Amino acid sequence: MSETVWTLSKYIVSTEYDDAIIIFSTKFGKILKISTAVWQCICVGNLDNLPTEIKESLIANQILVSNQKDEFTEILNQNESVNTNNTTLYEVIQPSAYCQMGCFYCGQNHQNINLNKKNILNIVDAIERKIKINSFTELRIGWFGAEPLIGMSSMFEITNRLKEICDKANIIYSAKIITNGLKLTESVFRDLYNKLFVDFIEITIDGVENAHNGRRNLKNSDKGTFKTIIRNLENIIKLKAQENYNVEISIRCNVDKENQTTVIPLIDFLKEKNILNSVNFYSAKIHEWGDKSNDEVIDFDYPSQEIFWFENLIKNGKGVSLLPKRVYNVCLATNKNSSVYDAFGNVFKCTEVPYITNDIKMMMEGFQLIIMKIFYVSIFLQKITFRMMGGLNLIFV
């Protein structure tokens, strides 16, 4: 048998740090620190000069791989295996096609329509069929919009029917919701937790008051939404503590070049209001959506700014995941069992397709057929900095 020839994996990111090299394995989500001498040996293929223990560590962490290994196919097979053996059926339901807000970057065209009885029954039947022909142990519903809380009556009916199906099948039922937060009062929060089995709530706040109100404005009024959302947040956080509700609350801040300077003030504001310690916080870069290119606001160095936001979160006592973990299934389009059901009864494979213009929708539906056959290999770092090295768990080689 011929001796294995080792080579540097395709799926690593390297960064110089002081007198060493930091290597991040995107396949494993692990980070190693090696000397520049070791790195030079790897780069020129002079692996015989590496000490045995160092070489074995690099192989164990798949920094070095056999030159006969097809890493791309291996990763695709791993992703497909995880997807095939997934025992949780995740379905997204949009109970309403309407939203009170008129956010400039939103690609949806809203209509004041909620799920009707016929479409509710069709959705429930479709989900029940999936449960019957598969070996799922859990059904998880994602309530999405437009604004899902506008369709609360549909949410109640669907939940009651699905919960009964899950009880008969002896599987777990759970739910999450993405909401703008305007209707998230204490009574609604109670219903979400006690009657709709929601254990995760995400609310979007796009900066401090002036910035947020200028972006996430009401459709039919110039009245701001920031104060209402913050008041609701404060109230549900208090209620969560009082009633010992086991529900996770997360704040998402959509960012572009216009509001990037308001992220840190927002974090500081949430800290002052005693909100930050009770929620998760993350940012997301605004992107194209439907016929909204958003070209005028998305051209800025998001990764560099995100590092400063991470630092500020850490200073305010929030833990931050600095490096991405290995992702085996990144969206509904690559999950063969999951679907998106909109308020008109249509079924899609992506949350960004409902309520957009027909020509864009046709293009995106065609794209779904392609993406369903392709599993994302890994999340690559856009930029790595190690000014916060003390917070990282490194393997020193």
Image (tube, rainbow, N blue to C red):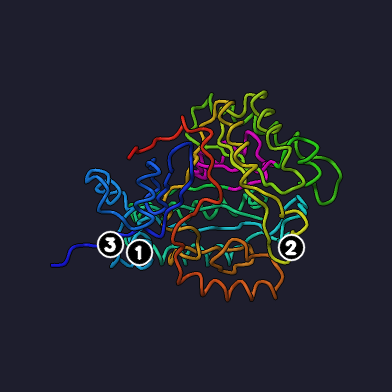
Q: Is residue 191 magenta?
A: yes
Q: Report the residue at 68% width, 50% height from top.
A: 150
Q: Amino acid at mark 3?
A: Ser
Query: How far is the residue under mark 1 from the one under mark 3?
Result: 9 Å
The residue to which callout 1 is attached is 71
**According to the image, label 3 marks what residue?**
66
Q: Residue at x 86, y 46 (%)?
A: 221
Viewer-proximal residue among 273 and 121: 273
- The alpha-carbon separation of the residues under discs 2 and 1 comes to 37 Å
Q: Please report the bounds of the magenta region as a residue range.
A: 178-205
Q: State the image coordinates of residue 4 (x, y, percent, origin top left).
A: 21, 62
Residue 283 x/y as whole percent = 62, 44
Q: Mark on residue 292?
A: 2
Label 2 vs label 1, nearer the camera: 1
Q: Residues within 10 Å of mark 2 (few under 14, many from 20)?
A: some
Task: Assess disc 3: are there few (<14), some (14-19) or many (≥20) residues with their C-alpha within 10 Å of its C-alpha.
Answer: some
The answer to whether marks 1 and 3 mark residues whose Cβ atoms lie closer than 8 Å is: no
Mark toward the start of the polypeptide (2 vs 1): 1
Residue 278 appears left or right of 205: left
Q: Is residue 203 visible?
A: no
Q: Earlier in the sequence, mark 1 or mark 3?
A: 3
Examine the image and state in which quarter residue 350 appears.
bottom right
Q: Amino acid at mark 1?
A: Glu
For the point 63% across and 51% down, which residue is it? 148
- Mark 2 vs mark 3, foreground winner is 3
From the image, state whether disc 1 or disc 3 is nearer to you.
Answer: 3
* Viewer can see residue 331: yes
Query: Where in the figure is residue 270, as x and y percent of width and height?
Result: 66, 29
